[in-house]
Image (cartoon, rainbow, N blue to C red):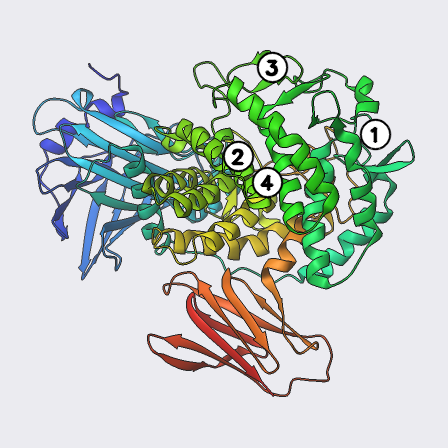
Amino acid sequence: MINPVTPWMATVQADIGRHTHICELSIENYNIKLFNTGDSIWLVSTWPNGGRIAFRLAFGMNSNFEKVNIDEKPNEILVTATTRLGYYRMTISIPANEKAVFRYTTSFRGNLPILIPFWPRDIAPLTKEGNVQNTAGIIHTHQVGTRSGQLYFSMTKPTVGSVFYFQNLTAISAYCQATEASLRETVGGNWPEIGFQLPINAQKPLPADTEYILSDAFVLLDQHIPVADNDIATKFLDHLSSIYTLIPKPQPKYHDWIAIAKNVMNDLYHNKGCWTQTNGIPFLNAYVADYETPSEIMVQLAVLLPLQEYLTWDGSDHPLFNDLDSGLNVFYDEQLKTIVRWHPALEDKLDKSEEQKREMVMDSWYLHHPLLNLARLALRGAQTARKLFLDSVDYAIHVAKHFEYNWPVFYKMTTLEVLKAETSPGKGGEKDVPGSYAHVMLMAWHLTGEKRFIREAEKALKSLDGLAFDIFYQANNTTFAAAALVEMYKETGESRYLELSYCCLAGIFKNCQIWECDYGYGQNFPYFFGIFPLNDAPYTAAYEELEVFAALHHYLEVSNGIEILPALKILIPEFIKYALDRLAYYFPPMLPREIISEDVKTGEVQNDLWIPLEDLHDGWEKNGTVGQEVYGAGLAFGIVPRQYYRLADPDILIFIDYPVTNFQTSKRSASFDLTGSSRFKCTIRLIRTSQIGLSTFEVRQKNKSNYQTIKEKSPDLFELAGTGTVRITWK
C-alpha cells in the first residue's frame, strides 16, 4: 500500500540521502545525526537494528538555511542558523534519564512580521531504500483537542521500534498569544506524516524582532513494539511518567479549601437558584436557575456523598444533608423495583430536547452511577441509601444479563428496547460500563457478603478484554472501574484484573492536559494536569474532575500493599497535587468576570456564587458556557477530608498535597505513609486553628532505614520526598 503524502514529506528521504550530516552524537545504543537539507534542519535517529526516523528541527518557510553554526558540549548541541526571513536557535540535549531520550527546542526571530499559513509536521519515517510512502506504522495514541501534545507510535515496515513523543505545549503559548492561534489538535497526523504541526497564523502576523519558541519536543526511543493491549497501556504509562520527570512544571498554589467549603455550604443552602421544591420536598437543580429540567437522582447524590464525607470529617451536622436525604425515596419505582433518573412527578416536564430527556429512557452509565453513590453512602451508615441500593441492585443485574454485559448508550427502562446502540457508528456502546457495573457489584458484596455479586462482577469484566485505551468512555466511571479491578485482583489473584486496571488508567492519562495554556483567557488560571470528561469533550468539567480525584485516591488505597506499576506512583500523586490548585478556579469568584461567558446554555451564571462552572475551555474561549453546575458543588466537600488531617490536638490541622495511607495520630504525635515517588516533592502545611497549643513541631521522614529531620521551608511549611513514612511530633 502506498501512503499519500504532501510535497513537504515526499522528498524527505531523498533530501537527507543526498546531504552529509553536519554533526553527530549517540544516546544509549542509538545514533543521532543532524542534516541541513536546504529548507529544513533534520535530526535522524538510527536504531541498533538500522531503522531510522527523522525529526524536523526547523522549517525555513520558503527559504533555505544559511550560515549554520554548531556549538557542541557534553550532552548538548546548539545549532544557530539564518534564512532570508530570520534567525533560528536549536538546542538538542540529552537529559539525565534511564531511557534513550533526547529533547529539541527551536526558537525563531523574524526579520519582519510574518503570516504563516502552513507548517509541515515534524516526524518522518525513513527506509534504507525506496520512499517514505512505502513505510507502515501504528499510531497507538495522539493528541485530541487540547489534551497533552503526545504521540505514541510504532514503525512496523520496516520493523524499527516505537517512539513516545511529547511536545511541551506550554513553551509555545507565547507564540499563540502573539498570533491568536490555538494549540488544539497540533500533535498527530496520518502515517507517514506525523508529529507536531505549528498552528498557522493566517490572520495575525508573528511580530518581528522577538524570539518565539516554535517547538519543545521530548522524544523517547524504544526498540520494543508493543502488540498486546496491556503491553501498549503499560508502555504508554511508563513512557509518559519518564517524560513527566523531565518536562518543566508550574508551581502549584495553596488554596484554603476549608474556607471554600464553608462558602459553598452557605451559598448552596441559601441560594434559591440551586433548588426546586416538589410536594413540599426540596431538590437540587442540575444548574443554577434551571427550573425547567426535572430533578434527577444523580444530582442529589453527587452532592450528598461528598457532603457526608465532609460532615463526618468535621464532626458536625447540617440541615442540607437531611434535606437531600429526605427526597431520595421518591426516585424509587415500585413497579420496576429500581431507582429511576427523573423525579416521577415531574416527568411531564421533560422537553425531549436530548435523547435522554424522555420518559423512562436510561443512559447506561447513569443507572450505575447513582447506585454506586448509594452504596458508598450505605457503607458509611446511611440507612435510606442502603435500602434504596439493595432494593434496586437486582434490576441492574437483570439489565446486565439482558445485554450480555455489553451495554448500549440508551435503552428503555420498561422494555429494555435499545434506543441508541453506539456512541458513534462502529464504536460500540459505553465500553467502561462493565467496569462501573462490576464496581456496583463489589459494593453489594461488601454490604451483604453474598458471593453472587462477585460472580456478576467477573462476568462483566470479561467485556473489557481487548479494549486497551478504548475502555475509556467517561473519565470518572473509568477511574472507579480501575479501582474495582484492583479489588478483583486482590479477591481472585488473577493478574489480568490488575493489568486491566492499567488499561483504564492509560485511558485516563491520555485524556489529560499536561501543559499550561498561557494564552488568551488561559493566563488567568491554571490548566496543568486537567482531565477531560469524555474522549471528545472540548472542555474540562468540574464534577468529573472531582470524581477522578476521589477515584485515584481510592485506587491507591485499595492497591496499598500491592506492587503496582511504578509509573502510577508518579502520575497519580502529581495529578492530585495539581488538582488541589486547579480545581479552585471552577468557582466564579476565583475568576475575572470578563473570562466568564455571558451566553449560557442552561440556567444562569451568578458570578459571586460559590457554585462551580461546569466547563473550562481553551484560552481563546470563554468559560461557563454550559452553566453553573450545582451537582459539582461537592467539589470542596470531597477535597477537604482527603487532604486535611486532624491531629489529637484540636488546635492544629495538617494539609498534605499528596495522597497518604496509614494515617495515625496520638496525643503528641502523628504518622503516615506517602504513596508517591522519591523523584518528586510533596508539602505539608501546619494550620493553627488557634494561637494556643503547639509551641514546637518536628517532622521526620524515613530515608531507607533511618529517619531524618526535615527543616521548615517557610514558617509552618515542610517539603518532603514523595514517598516514605513520615512522623510528626509536637510539644
Instruction: Check disc 2 and give the amino acid type.
Output: Ser
Instruction: Report helix, strand or loop for mark 2.
Output: helix
Is the Cβ of the residue at disc 3 closer than 8 Å to that at disc 4? no
Q: Which of marks 4 and 1 precedes in the sequence?
A: 1
In the depicted structure, whether residue 315 falls above or below residue 144? below
Residue at 87 percent across and 41 percent down: it is: 272
Towards the viewer: 661 or 525: 661
Assign a secondary structure to mark 3: loop
**Callout 1 environment at 10 Å: few (<14), some (14 to 19), or many (20+)?**
some
* CA neighbours of label 4 inside 10 A, class few (<14), some (14 to 19), many (20+): many
**Residue for badge 3:** 416
State the residue position of label 4: 544
Q: Which mark is residue 485?
A: none
Three-letter residue code for mark 3: Leu
- Find numbered disc 4 in the image and state the secondary structure of the residue it sits on: helix
Give me the C-alpha separation between circle 2 and circle 1. Answer: 30 Å
